[in-house]
Amino acid sequence: MTSKTILSYKGPFYIELISVFGMNIRNLKDEYNNARKKLFKIFIELCQNVSNYSEDFHMVNHVQRIGVGELILQELEDSYKFTTTNQVKNTDAKILAERCELVNASDPLKLRELKREQRLNSPGEKFGARIGLIQAVMLSKNKLEYKNEEIDKDYSYFSLTIKIDKN
Amino acid sequence: MENITLTSSPTTPYFPEVIFDASKGVCEISGESYMEETYKFYLPLINWLKEYTKEVNKPVELNIKLIYLNTSSTKCVLDMLEILKDYEDAGGKVKVNWYYDKSDPDMVDEVEDFEAESGVKIELIEFN
């Protein structure tokens, strides 16, 4: 097997949709039970990042902001590969890249320390816990791959990819 | 003090079921938690615990039976645990039980982190 696309979507990341996609992930092959659990958690987390933070968004009833982006989930021989892409400000792309570098450079102990520190110090409310990327790496035990493609002087498309091993 | 009862629905699996019973002092959150605007959902629960620990002043038990919670929800759960820790430090009786699926070892790590961050002892119990 080279790679097989399990799921591909482009549009607004409504929770109703994320939830249905998530259920499909849970129903993937039985033999990779632990990988499916991890994949589901990472899938929800990264999709909600798009929904909450994409600079391209829809407003629902003039109050609720739903981010627009893309996702692709692929199955490889020994792993699943999940990618999300969304629009960000160029200034935020730089911060995100730095955050990915920090997470990738941290060993499991350091990641756990970072997670505890960030969650405790997050202002909460609409900011959440700010540990989604850390959690994704802690769960998958693989590094984040990121790519930034500039659209114009203000905005970029920022892609995040993570691999979840089947065993 | 009023109870909080929120039932779950298969069409919105991202909302957990909630039963906060003031007469028994037992609070339960079960199912899954990955809704949008997490804080709006948890704020009434956080306020309930603040009111209970301030005004009712009896033992309180929190039973968490969440199969999955997203990181935003973890922040809200931590807020609740911190309220319970303050209550315990002030002499209140607190018990926290976390029910987990033994085929999900990541949840055990999560509970250890909650204990370390909040300072509250959490009893880990396997789902039957």
Image: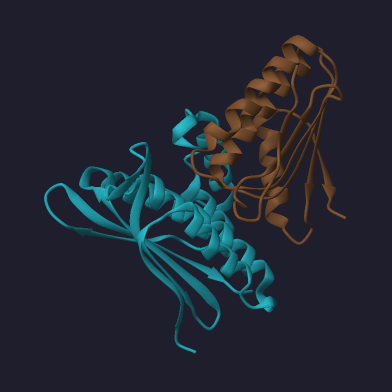
Residue B105 seen in this snapshot? yes
Quarter residue A64 falls in? top left
Residue B68, x across and y down, in percent? 65, 51
Numbered label tally: 0
Residue B89, x across and y down, in percent? 76, 15
Chain A tint in image: cyan
Quadrant into which the C terminus of chain A falls: bottom right
Residue at left offset 80%, top offset 22%? B22
Residue at left offset 75%, top offset 26%? B3
- Residue A115 vs B103, above or below: the answer is above
Q: Is residue B71 left or right of residue B67?
A: left
**Residue found farthest to the left:** A153
Residue at left offset 50%, top offset 29%? A121
Residue A125, x across and y down, in percent? 49, 30
Residue at left offset 56%, top offset 54%? A138
**Residue found farthest to the bottom:** A1
- Residue A61 vs B52, above or below: the answer is below
> Which chain gets the brown colouring?
B
- Residue B10 vs A126, above or below: the answer is below
